[in-house]
Image (cartoon, rainbow, N blue to C red):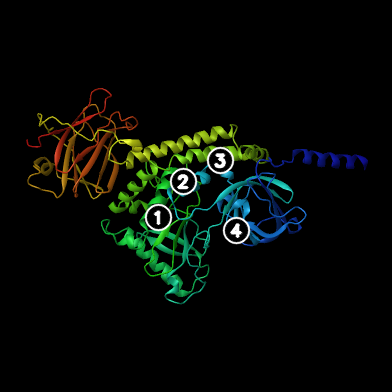
């Protein structure tokens, strides 16, 4: 008997020695569920009490105490983050509105675990950086999120991020809150808060994107729809879908979608290379009124960010199917606005993100040590600084790549312009086209096969095709895949082309001004194996030549045979 008691005491001592305690560098949220019940459901809240200890940190206010805790409810949340990790995320509902961690008073918050952030060695950076970029670029509302540590039923469960739950509220998504099961035809025009979802389990309507792909639209507000509400929401989504897949030169889409809100939302997703951003957890909202527009936002889930060396747009590569955005990026007006907002942001507030990252690291670094003790399976062997530096480097590369695509053409500054917009071509040097050729035409963003004989016979003065025609021959040394970067009047086309030495290619653009860059293989960085920007308002022919590894020269030549 004594021996049994001894081993029981030894076991208890062992557990207590292994228990992890808070770091003391962040506030701690203490939660005690009723009867210490486990939290097993995402649907049903259970009763609990809580108090927030500021741990003597002057920047935070303690709320409640150990002897006088406050009432709350708690349940699980998330999809893969709920089922895929032992470190769980939670949704909490306070009995009374409180300004937790200095946030606006509310009852509704989430506790995001970000186990996948440490698991993927991202330094708890993805949501933090995505949210901050959203604030810097000027999104109307971005959820506030602040780090803290959590003790649940006496068990230290690590570093969490207390985050504002996305909901209709004057301090969050500030639109009219539409009643459930509304039947008034004017009142059902808003407010709406919906999510482009990648799960069909939540209450939703369904449309066929482009007549092909199933698209789930989960409704958050209102939560229960009347027949008229369901009909209205479905008609609105189908209308937008028809316009997205319609005439790219029409402005009708922008009577229903707010262009600036979408442009800012999209830029943030590109900066983080969040290739799941228009696939799920993609929010839209609309205020009341027949003429009120749908707004993309707020941002939410950046779990698929910073995973690649960026060499394409986030919706390219088919990692996930991103709804609408590949088609929307074909609208000249939209891409023109994206570039305007990008250049203002990149040359303005963007660099503040790196100061934020430094502050973020200093805030959480000691808590990360404790989180690693509690959840070693979700941490790598290297330091937090190593992971943050790695992710920051990816962000810098993303920004540089985007700036090369969207840079301003007004010259100079931090916008990445090549700095030489004057193409001093010799006047009509001798021009000898090759005999056998393989021709393609770019028209309205599509590469079309073209009659070789007709291409060779184009004199341009005869205007056999509408708009600007550019005909070019690449250097004999260019044997890799040729990248052709084309834009004009806000239209951007970017494609890999099997363009071999000795071939002629013809590009047709129906607009007033055309800008082309030719690039051999991976020669973008530092601009080797790349031409200068070719700006033209007239049809012309060019011979591309290159000396060694120097930047290639595009020389305008006589198009006549």
- N-terminal of the pair, mark 3 or mark 2, is 2
As measured in the structure, the alpha-carbon distance from the residue carrying label 1 to the one carrying label 4 is 26 Å
Task: Identify the image quadrant of residue 407.
Answer: top left
Residue 260 shows in the view: yes
Q: Which residue is drawn at 26% across and 22% down?
A: 548
Q: What secondary structure is found at the residue carrying circle 1?
A: helix
Pick out the residue farthest to the right: 2
Tell me the CA gap for discs 3 and 2: 13 Å
User: Which residue is at the far front?
Assistant: 58
* Residue hosting label 4: 105
Q: In this view, does 1 lie to the left or right of 33?
A: right
Q: Nearer the viewer, residue 65 or 38?
A: 65
Residue 544 higher or lower than 158, as above or below: above
Q: Distance between the residues labelled 1 and 2?
A: 14 Å
Q: Mark 3 points at which residue?
A: 360
Q: Residue 133 carries which label?
A: 2
């Amino acid at each position: 008997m004594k021996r049994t008691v001894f081993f029981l005491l030894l076991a208890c001592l062992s557990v207590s020695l292994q228990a992890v305690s808070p770091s003391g560098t962040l506030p701690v949220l203490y939660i005690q569920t009723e009867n210490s019940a486990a939290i097993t459901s995402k649907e049903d809240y259970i009763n609990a009490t809580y108090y927030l200890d500021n741990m003597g940190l002057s920047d935070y206010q303690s709320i409640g105490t150990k002897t006088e805790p406050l009432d709350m409810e708690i349940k699980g949340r998330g999809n893969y983050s709920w089922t895929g990790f032992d470190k769980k995320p939670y949704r909490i509902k306070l009995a009374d509105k409180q300004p937790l961690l200095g946030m606006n008073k509310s009852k509704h918050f989430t506790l995001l675990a970000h186990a996948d952030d440490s698991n993927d060695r991202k330094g708890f950076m993805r949501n933090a950086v995505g949210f901050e970029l959203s604030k810097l670029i000027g999104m109307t509302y971005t959820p506030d999120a602040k780090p803290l540590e959590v003790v649940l039923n006496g068990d230290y469960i690590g570093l969490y991020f207390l985050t504002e739950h996305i909901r209709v509220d004057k301090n969050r998504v500030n639109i009219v809150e539409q009643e459930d099961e509304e039947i008034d035809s004017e009142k059902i025009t808003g407010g709406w808060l919906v999510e482009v979802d990648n799960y069909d389990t939540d209450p939703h309507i369904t449309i066929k994107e482009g007549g092909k792909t199933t698209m789930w639209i989960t409704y958050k507000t209102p939560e229960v729809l009347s027949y008229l509400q369901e009909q209205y929401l479905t008609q609105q989504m189908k209308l937008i879908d028809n316009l997205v897949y319609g005439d790219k030169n029409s402005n009708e889409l922008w009577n229903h979608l707010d262009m600036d809100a979408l442009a800012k939302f999209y830029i943030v997703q590109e900066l983080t290379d969040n290739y799941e951003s228009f696939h799920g957890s993609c929010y839209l909202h609309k205020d009341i009124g027949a003429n009120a527009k749908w707004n993309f936002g707020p941002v939410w889930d950046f779990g698929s960010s910073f995973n690649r060396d960026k060499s394409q747009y986030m919706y390219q590569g088919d990692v996930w199917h991103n709804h609408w955005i590949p088609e929307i990026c074909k609208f000249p007006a939209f891409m023109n606005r994206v570039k305007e907002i990008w250049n203002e942001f990149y040359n303005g507030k963007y660099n503040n993100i790196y100061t934020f990252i430094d502050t973020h690291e200093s805030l959480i670094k000691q808590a990360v040590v404790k989180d690693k003790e509690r959840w070693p399976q979700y941490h790598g062997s290297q330091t937090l600084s190593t992971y943050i530096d790695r992710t920051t480097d990816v962000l810098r590369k993303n920004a540089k790549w985007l700036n090369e695509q969207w840079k301003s053409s007004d010259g100079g500054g931090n916008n990445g312009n090549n700095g030489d917009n004057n193409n001093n071509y010799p006047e009509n040097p001798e021009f000898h086209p090759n005999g056998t050729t393989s021709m393609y035409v770019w028209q309205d963003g599509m590469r079309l096969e073209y009659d070789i004989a007709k291409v060779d016979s184009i004199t341009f003065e005869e205007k056999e095709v509408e708009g600007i025609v550019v005909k070019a021959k690449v250097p004999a040394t260019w044997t890799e895949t040729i990248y052709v970067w084309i834009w004009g009047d806000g239209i951007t086309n970017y494609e890999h082309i099997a363009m071999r030495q000795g071939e002629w290619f013809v590009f047709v653009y129906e607009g007033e001004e055309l800008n082309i860059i030719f690039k051999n293989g991976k020669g973008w960085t530092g601009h080797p194996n790349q031409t200068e920007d070719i700006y033209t308002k007239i049809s012309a022919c060019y011979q591309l030549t290159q000396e060694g590894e120097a930047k290639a020269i595009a020389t305008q030549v006589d198009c006549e045979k």
